[in-house]
Image (cartoon, rainbow, N blue to C red):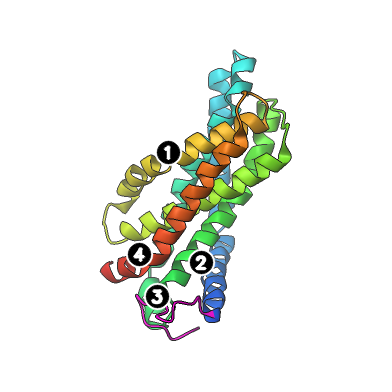
């Protein structure tokens, strides 16, 4: 790992090559812990499936309405799953002095942020893939554009992971962070819910909208939160 002191943003203005190594190490650490604990598969995936089933029962009387609402139901379920994933990611850094150990090891805060966001994104993409199969089976949904569906998932997930990791660091030092995080995160993710739902409406052929235009909103959201995280994560680590 590189020896950049905590809070620094590589004064030479360049992205040091060592940051990529740190990013991979941080992301790999989180993913290995999740793989060993099986939290994602034993808790998050069943939770996501249960949400889809409950939504399906609620609207089952009107199959056409259920199909038309597929995009909104899918991304509402994703946001619930994202809260659980981000809470888990935050807990990993605050337990057993893991965060302090990273700082003492000289890991660049930006690398910690990107690595943790990457780990959250990977977990969400796995869950989204399973949920996509779920909505096709349970809701009898038909995908008209797999390309738009895939790109929407990537852009929306990037924004969710970046915003979640940033807010997770913000509330890391709060005792009631399990309660505070959803209160902060869900309103912030409203643009993702709107943009991703409209893009899915186009991808599933349930509404006459231009999904690629809404994809631009998702891209801007992801970039803004990623840049904010890279710039602010060091200060948040030092504060908490």
Total labels: the figure holds 4
Image spot of residue 207 (x, y percent): 61, 23
Is label 3 or label 1 in front? 3
Q: CA distance from mark 2 to mark 4?
A: 15 Å
Regarding residue 42, the answer to whether it shows in the image is no
Q: 41 above or below 75?
A: below
Q: Residue 5 in magenta?
A: yes
> For residue 129, what is the image quadrant?
top right
* Mark 4 neighbour class, 10 Å CA radius: few under 14, some 14 to 19, many 20 or more: some
Please tell me the numbered disc located at residue 115: 2
Q: Earlier in the sequence, mark 3 or mark 1?
A: 3
Q: Residue furthest top?
A: 61
Q: The C terminus appears in which quarter of the rendering?
A: bottom left
Q: CA distance from mark 4 to mark 1?
A: 22 Å
Please tell me the numbered disc located at residue 9: 3
The residue at which mark 4 appears reads as 232
* Mark 1 neighbour class, 10 Å CA radius: few under 14, some 14 to 19, many 20 or more: few
Which residue is at the front of the view, 188 or 75? 188
Q: Earlier in the sequence, mark 4 or mark 1?
A: 1
Q: Earlier in the sequence, mark 1 or mark 2?
A: 2
Q: CA distance from mark 4 to mark 3?
A: 10 Å
Please tell me the numbered disc located at residue 190: 1
The residue stretch that appears in magenta: 1-16
- Element at label 3: loop
What residue lies at 72% left-to-right and 32% top-to-bottom?
Answer: 143
- Element at label 4: helix
Q: 171 above or below 66?
A: below
């Amino acid at each position: 790992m590189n020896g950049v002191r905590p809070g620094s943003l590589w004064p030479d203005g360049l992205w040091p090559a060592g940051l990529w190594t740190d990013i991979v190490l941080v992301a790999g650490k989180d993913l290995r812990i999740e793989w060993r604990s099986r939290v994602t598969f034993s808790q998050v995936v069943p939770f996501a499936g249960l949400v889809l089933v409950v939504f399906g029962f609620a609207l089952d009387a009107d199959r056409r309405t259920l199909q038309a609402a597929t995009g909104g139901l899918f991304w509402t379920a994703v946001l619930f799953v994202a809260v659980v994933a981000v809470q888990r990611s935050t807990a990993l850094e605050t337990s057993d002095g893991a965060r302090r150990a990273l700082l003492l090891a000289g890991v660049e805060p930006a690398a910690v942020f990107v690595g943790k966001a990457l780990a959250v994104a990977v977990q969400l993409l796995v869950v989204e893939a399973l949920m996509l199969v779920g909505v096709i089976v349970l809701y009898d949904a038909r995908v008209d554009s797999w390309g738009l569906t895939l790109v929407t998932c990537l852009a929306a997930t990037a924004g969710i992971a970046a915003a979640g990791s940033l807010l997770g660091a913000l509330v890391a030092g709060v005792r009631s962070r399990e309660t505070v995080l959803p209160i902060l995160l869900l309103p912030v993710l409203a643009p993702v819910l709107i943009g991703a739902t409209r893009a899915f409406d186009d991808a599933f052929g349930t509404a006459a909208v231009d999904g690629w235009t809404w994809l631009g909103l998702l891209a801007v959201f992801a970039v803004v939160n990623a840049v904010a995280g890279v710039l602010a994560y060091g200060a948040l680590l030092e504060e908490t």
